[in-house]
Structure formats: C-alpha cells, structure tokens
Image (cartoon, rainbow, N blue to C red):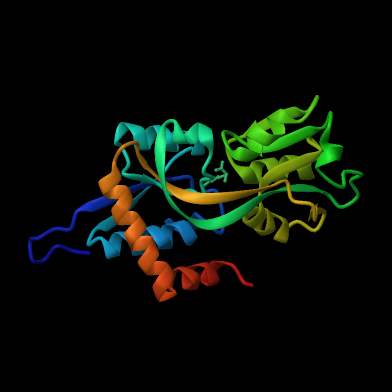
Amino acid sequence: GKSDSGDKKETLVMATNAEFPPYEFYEGDKVVGIDADIAAAVAEEMGMELKIEDMAFDSIIAAVTSGKADIGAAGMTVTEDRLENVDFTDTYAKATQVIIVKNDSAIAGPDDLTGKKIGVQLGTTGDIYADDIEDAEVERYNKGFEAVQALQQGKIDAVVIDGEPAKEFVKEAEDLKILDEAFTEEEYAIAVKKGNDELKDKINEALASLKDSGKLDEIVAKYISA
Ligand code: ARG
C-alpha cells in the first residue's frame, strides 16, 4: 500500500512467468492467478508487500539464486535437479503433466509418443519428460500457448504440459483434446535462495496458516471451478 505514515513495508519480489493460467496470467496489465494471490497472501502474513516480476520461465531460478527475486512462484514443480540450485517451501498444489492432441489424433497415451514431434514450454518438466521419449523430436516454445497453437497448425503431433493450463488452453480450441492418461504426478512449491531458511520458514508458516484458515482453498476455487 501507500506509505503515508512513512514506515514503508518491505517488498517481497516474486519471479514468475505469466503465461500459465490459472496460476499466473495477465488481466489487463496486471499479473493475476493462483500463485499471484497466494504470494500476495503470504506477503501479507509476513507484513510485506508483494512485487511481481514477469520473465521467461527458464530465468526464474537464476533470478532467485542471484537475489534479483526473493521467491520464484510459477507453478514450479519440485525436482531433484532444481533442488541443487534452490530450496523449495512446502508444496501448495498437486499437478500432473498431460498430453494434448488434435481430436482426430491416433495418439491415445504416453506410449504412443515414441518418434513423435512434441511441443513443450522451454525448461519445464514437460520439456524434460518429452526429452526422455524415444526418438521424439522436442519443439521448445517460450510460451505454453505457442506450443498449443503449433499443434493446431499441424506443426507438431502433441503437447506435453501441466494439467490446469492445458484445460485453459484447450477450452478455446474445439479441435483439441486432453488425453485421459496423465503423464506424471508433480507438486508445486515456491523456490527460495538456497540456504535462506529464515525466509523459507516464514513462508511455510504463512502457507500453513493459509491452509488452516481455508484461504488457500478459497484462492484456488476463485480460479479453478471444481
Ligand atoms: N510445472 C512445470 C515446471 O515446473 C511448468 C511450470 C511453468 N510455469 C509457468 N509459469 N510458465 O516445469
């Protein structure tokens, strides 16, 4: 808020990639979504003010390690590799990687992706899984939605992406479907600088209180209809 009393609140800088509805996306010129609301609520619990920095997804970890941002909140999956560079708070959401194909596609599940052209968002877990598929050709896009557009244009055979954004992207695309068979289960958490236990503990406390009070569920329900 405005510092009319002079005692300005400390800022909590959140790095994100606002190409990922319902977790972070633009509404006008404002970044909104589940992560934005959770981070704002966490900041409030900590008596701080949230500032959001939008950047490429694969720049977020570097922003946190360099101190350019205090936290990374971007529907970011906890992975062993990332844990080498950052620490993660407690998880606040479960997620899956799903496969999007055209309605008339012969691809019916992960096993059918062998040798196919697969679109992903650069640097995401979808990118990592797709890369592991035998003989697959992985096309990397800066934005998940660009992969979906390439699929519609017939440039690729499938998109591997997180389940909730997939629903958002396919909602508008009558020629596309999400396969029932999910690829993996994942957990989202907030990234903090390695060794910054003070911040991590404070965020975990705030997250726990948001879970207890029902505020976290409220935020999720605002963006995801059951
Ligand atoms: N959950 C995936 C990952 O951690 C994708 C996250 C993409 N998030 C974003 N804001 N674009 O790699």
- Position of residue 131 measured from the top left corner of the image (x, y, whole percent): 69, 29
User: At 64% across and 46% down in the image, what residue appears?
Assistant: 145
Residue 33 visible, this orientation:
no
**Quarter containing the C terminus:** bottom right
Q: In the picture shown, does residue 69 fall above or below 205?
A: above
User: At 35% across and 33% down in the image, what residue appears?
Assistant: 65
- Position of residue 140 measured from the top left corner of the image (x, y, whole percent): 65, 32
Q: Quadrant of ligand 1?
A: top right
Residue 225 visible, this orientation:
yes
Extreme residue in the left direction: 6
- Position of residue 27 measured from the top left corner of the image (x, y, whole percent): 48, 60
Extreme residue in the top direction: 135
Instruction: Name the side, left or right, on which 195 lies relative to 121.
Output: left
Q: In the picture shown, does residue 23 fall above or below 198?
A: below
User: At 52% across and 71% down in the image, what residue appears?
Assistant: 222
The number of numbered badges drawn on the structure is 0
Instruction: Name the side, left or right, on which 3 lies relative to 96.
Output: left
Q: Observer-nearest residue: 120 or 87?
A: 87
**Quarter containing the N terminus:** bottom left
- Position of residue 89 measured from the top left corner of the image (x, y, whole percent): 40, 50
Instruction: Name the side, left or right, on which 4 lies relative to 1.
Output: left
Instruction: Name the side, left or right, on which 97 lies relative to 48.
Output: right
User: At 91% across and 49% down in the image, what residue appears?
Assistant: 104
